[in-house]
Image (spheres, grey):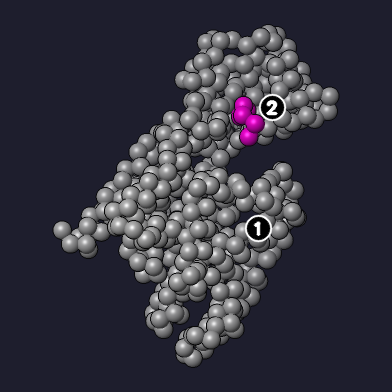
Amino acid sequence: MTRRGTTAALLVALLATATALRLYHLGSWGLEGAEIFTLRDSLTTRTLRGSRPLLFFFNYHLIRPTFGLDELGIRILPAVFGILSVPVLYWVTRAAVGARPALFACTLLTFSSLLVYRSQFARYWTLVFLLCSAYPILIYLGLRDGRWGRVALGLVVAVLAILAHPASVLLAGGLGLWMLISALGSSTLQPRVRTALRWALVAVGVIALIVAVRLLPMLESWIATPHMRRLRGPALILSHVDGLTAPVVIAAGAGIIWLARQDRSLALLLAALALVPALFLSLLSYWTAVSTVYLFPTAPVAFIGAGIFLDRLTRLPGSERQGAFASATVLAMLLAGNVPGIISQYRDGGRADFRSAAEFLSGRARASDLVVADQPRTVGHYLEGRSVTLLHRDPGALEAAYTKAGADRGGTLWVVALAGQRGGFKAHKLGLATLSEWLYDRCRLRASYGRARLDWRSNEVQVFECSPTTAATSPAVTPATGSATR
């Protein structure tokens, strides 16, 4: 088989593996977190209006009439975009640095536990990854080679990426920094390329002005809105690194440094694409809550950089067999960090099982009872026609709800809460008692849903029954299967 045939066979194998990993158990789990908002917006988004309408628009026009928007339906496109990211990343990486680093990058992408999870979560992040893999590299290659068709295609893809999520525009900051440094600091550029870069800088400035006018009001309202505590500065970056795994990020950094010795321009671009958004969001996190996932548009750089690093290992002095052995060994080490996450993904879907908690309540909560939950929209979705209110993690607020349910309504207070520290009530001390102490003093644990994972994360959901006649002791519960004795 020729080298080209071997490369094609490997790419097909990676694509098949990525498809299997991203489709396995796709519709098995209930909705959780922001998935409920995807369902809501996908039922109403007929046009490309709004701050991030692209996925919702596709769901409304493609998925809703064909498959329906249930647990499986709203996850179809995220899974498809997660699968398509493999050949797209290969295409742009091969065009920039060659076929072998592209294959290494796609191998890491295929087995990334973070990308598997995002591909099975009904949100727009795999679409963002797909588009952000392409548009900066397309614009770079077009400007470098004087191929204006690629530049035009890159600009179109950039617009789609911003329609997928505004965080995608942060890569334009890295692209603009590369243009500025290249136009002012390089004496090796051809005059026509230098002229093209200067015009591109003007274009980036105009686009930035348009984007600012479009998104600044949203940013102002976002900063002004009260938020729960979130990670700040370096902690925000480390959280993103944890998702990609630290070995992959370290390998990516080494690959970019290695690349700088041969192609300083491309190394500068990759570094700017990663660092400019990270610096901006780190500073912004001191003013307002910034989610780690806003750094997701930079994730393609990690896979490209790590692919370059593995390729360079094969070129170290010595025999070709020694280089292949070294790169295969390091590749296995990089992939091993994803094994616990992938196995855990198929145990609980990486989400809390509010659907099972709602099913437990559906046969027990009376009309006079009051239900409060960490995710009231999600629980309410499965308790059709039932009002569910937000669980305020304050013993005083919960005491008021308890009194209202018992004295005013003659019913019971049901509490559906995340049990892990991510849910909050193991660590929050408010007033004289922790929320957990309040629950254990006045309520009975009736059900617990969650499965043990191989990584450190916990997605256990607990259901408490709180009434004046409820015993303070808890019944026997089997958390691993989510069943409870009555």
- Which residue lies at the image location 58% right of the left edge and 37% below the top edge? 377
Q: Can the viewer see residue 63?
A: no
From the image, which quarter does the N terminus lie in? Answer: bottom left
Question: Along the horizontal axis of the image, is 467 left or right of 120?
Answer: right
- 77 lies left or right of 397: left
Question: Residue 198: horizontal and vertical position, in percent?
Answer: 56, 85
- The three-letter code of the residue at mark 2 reads Lys
Which SS class for mark 1? Answer: helix
Kind of residue at badge 1 = Leu
Residue placed under numbered mark 2 in the picture: 426
Closer to us: 188 or 96: 188
Looking at this view, is 357 or 152 the one in front? 152
The secondary structure type at the circle numbered 2 is: loop
Q: Quadrant of residue 146?
A: bottom left
- Which badge, 2 or 1, comes first in the chain's sequence? 1
Q: Position of residue 279 (x, y in %)?
A: 65, 60
- Report the disc number at residue 463: none
Residue plotted at (80% across, 23% down): 433
- Asked whether residue 450 is in view, the answer is yes
Q: Where is residue 345, by image quadrant?
A: top left
Mark 2: few/some/many CA within 10 Å (<14, 14-19, 20+): some
18 relative position to 390: left or right: left
**Looking at the image, which residue is at 45% across and 80% down?**
143
Q: Residue furthest front?
A: 318
Residue range highlighted in magenta:
416-422
Where 252 sits versus 191, above or below? above
Residue 30 sits inside the magenta stretch: no
Residue under label 1:
281
Cα–Cα span, label 2 and label 1? 29 Å
The residue at 20%/60% (across/down) is: 5
Q: Is residue 31 above or below residue 152?
A: above
**263 or 243, which lies in front?**
263
